Amino acid sequence: MKIPEQNLLRVCEILAMNGEIIATGRISEITEKQVKIVNSIGNMAVLEGNMLIKVLVHNQVNDGETFVALVYSSNADELIITNVEVLSNFEKREYFRVGMKLDTKCYIDEGSGELDEMNSFKVKVRDLSLRGAFIVTNAILEDNQRLFLVLPLAETEIFKCTLKRKVNYYNKSVGYGCCFEKYTNKQEDLLCQFIFEEQRKLILKAKKIDC
């Protein structure tokens, strides 16, 4: 989404997702895809690309809105963010599942932490969220079985997950709801970016159909 134009030149705080203040700045540019925040003193913290952050915009009356965004680029003088979304919407959709047809593979977790090709099998990811995924496969799996799911995001990442529910299909394939176990901040950022982009594609597709 695009941050409303009335926020141009307003002071804002850059926050980590846990609420910790990272930096302060002023919104200097708003476009359809990006927002630029600058600091004239040049003492902004340098943030990693694709990091998920909050932006609290201040105005003269109250604290204004808080947005969630991904870091596009960052240095001591300026921060450029993308994939902007109102925090309240993000929180409502934090575990929103986006539908897709993604061919990939899983590995059975044997407890060693190693990926053994002998224990790999093909799956189709039918939907994905920050909490987990729904996969379809011909492999026979057990409830609460632990797997490693390979996800080709902006970078290929491997997510450890546990099977929580099972759905049988007419063609002998089986669907499994998988819950992600704890993953890294980098994986969270890549996953958020991927889900945001998939959501945007679905919205654009829906608009074309409506037209």
Image: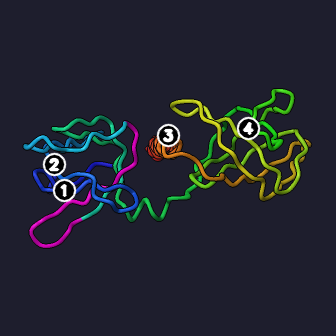
Q: Position of residue 29 (x, y in %)?
A: 16, 42
- Name the side, left or right, on which 1 lies relative to 176: left
Q: Position of residue 167 (x, y in %)?
A: 83, 54
Question: Quick check: marks 2 and 1 in contact, CB under 8 Å?
Answer: yes
Q: Position of residue 37 (x, y in %)?
A: 19, 45
Task: Look at label 3 and name its amino acid.
Answer: Leu
Q: Which element is circle 4 on?
A: strand
Q: Residue 12: which disc?
A: 1
- Against 201, residue 179 (above or below) is below
Q: Position of residue 66 (x, y in %)?
A: 29, 61
- Return the disc, 2 or 4, that comes first in the chain's sequence: 2
Which contiguous range is marked in magenta?
Answer: 49-64
Q: Residue 27: which disc?
A: 2
**Which image quadrant is residue 126 in?**
top right
Question: Quick check: marks 2 and 3 in contact, CB under 8 Å?
Answer: no
Question: Quick check: marks 1 and 3 in contact, CB under 8 Å?
Answer: no
Q: Which element is circle 2 on?
A: strand
* Residue 28 falls inside the magenta stretch: no
Distance from the alpha carbon under mark 3 to that under mark 4:
19 Å
Name the residue tied to disc 4: 124
Distance from the alpha carbon under mark 2 to that under mark 4:
42 Å
